[in-house]
């Protein structure tokens, strides 16, 4: 399982941030040719289509999407490189959630949530997911995001294929820190 997790992380790195490390390119919508991806990864480690499909199928965050014909793959969200995921703006639920580490709290309450090198701020539809995300970065803190108010005030929201909510920024006025339960 550890080997598969490492391959999954490497796949995310390639498809979200640095396709050039394996000699491939993404199209304008973030899609990579599966055969080129397989050849590129296989130059440095064992990797084949069966392994790729297993990673896509079992990834708990559903980070990847295969095209209907199975010839292309892309990351569902999380890019630091400019891609158009062809997402349509939509009305979010009134409340969304964001998990972070307590060490970032003061900055977040001053500057709000920023993209931090990615295309979007990532928001969760549920509290438990936000706690898990925050715990990856240290002692977690969760913010309730007043997304319904933001939307009413003209901020666009998008929902990635894997259910993650995306927006360009969340001003601090729309954030309510929530103590962990």
Image (cartoon, rainbow, N blue to C red):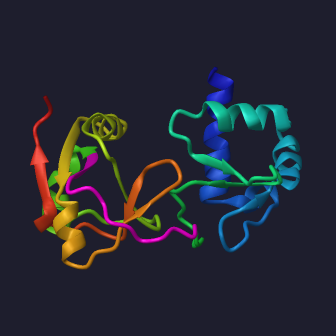
For the point 25% across and 39% down, the residue is 127
Question: Which x, y percent locates residue 123?
Answer: 33, 53
> Quarter of the image holding residue 92?
bottom left
**Considering depth in this image, is 59 or 134 the residue closer to the camera?**
59
For the point 78% across and 32% down, the residue is 51
Query: How many numbered tags mark residues here?
Result: 0
The span shown in magenta is: 85-99
Whether residue 153 sits left or right of residue 99 in the image: it is: left
For the point 81% across and 52% down, the residue is 69
For the point 61% across and 40% down, the residue is 9
Whether residue 118 sits left or right of residue 20 in the image: it is: left
Whether residue 102 sits left or right of residue 18 in the image: it is: left
Residue 93 in the magenta stretch? The answer is: yes
Per the picture, the main secondary structure of the magenta-coloured stretch is loop
Res. 47 visible in picture: no
Question: Which x, y percent locates residue 143?
Answer: 18, 49
Question: Which x, y percent locates residue 103?
Answer: 21, 46
Residue 96 in the magenta stretch? The answer is: yes
Extreme residue in the bottom direction = 154
Question: Which x, y percent locates residue 136?
Answer: 37, 37
Extreme residue in the top direction = 1
**Position above or below: 5 against 66:** above
Res. 132 visible in picture: yes
Classify the position of the C terminus by image quarter: top left
Classify the position of the N terminus by image quarter: top right
> Quarter of the image holding residue 28?
bottom right
**Position above or below: 89 against 42:** below
């Amino acid at each position: 399982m550890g080997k598969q997790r490492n391959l999954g992380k490497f796949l995310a790195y390639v498809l979200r941030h640095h396709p050039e490390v394996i000699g491939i390119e993404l199209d304008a919508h973030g899609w990579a040719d599966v055969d080129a991806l397989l050849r590129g990864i296989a130059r440095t480690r064992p990797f084949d289509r069966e392994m790729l499909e297993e990673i896509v199928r079992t990834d708990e965050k559903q980070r990847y999407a295969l095209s209907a014909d199975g010839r292309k793959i892309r990351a569902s969200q999380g890019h630091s490189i400019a891609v158009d995921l062809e997402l349509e703006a939509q009305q979010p639920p009134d409340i969304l959630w964001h998990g972070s580490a307590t060490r970032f709290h003061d900055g977040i309450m001053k500057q709000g949530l920023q993209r931090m090198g990615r295309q979007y701020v990532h928001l969760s539809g549920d509290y438990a997911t936000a706690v898990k995300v925050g715990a990856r970065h240290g002692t977690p803190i969760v913010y309730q995001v007043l997304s319904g108010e933001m939307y009413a005030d003209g901020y666009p929201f998008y929902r990635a294929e894997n259910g993650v909510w995306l927006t360009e920024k969340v001003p601090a006025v729309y954030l309510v820190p929530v103590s962990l339960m």
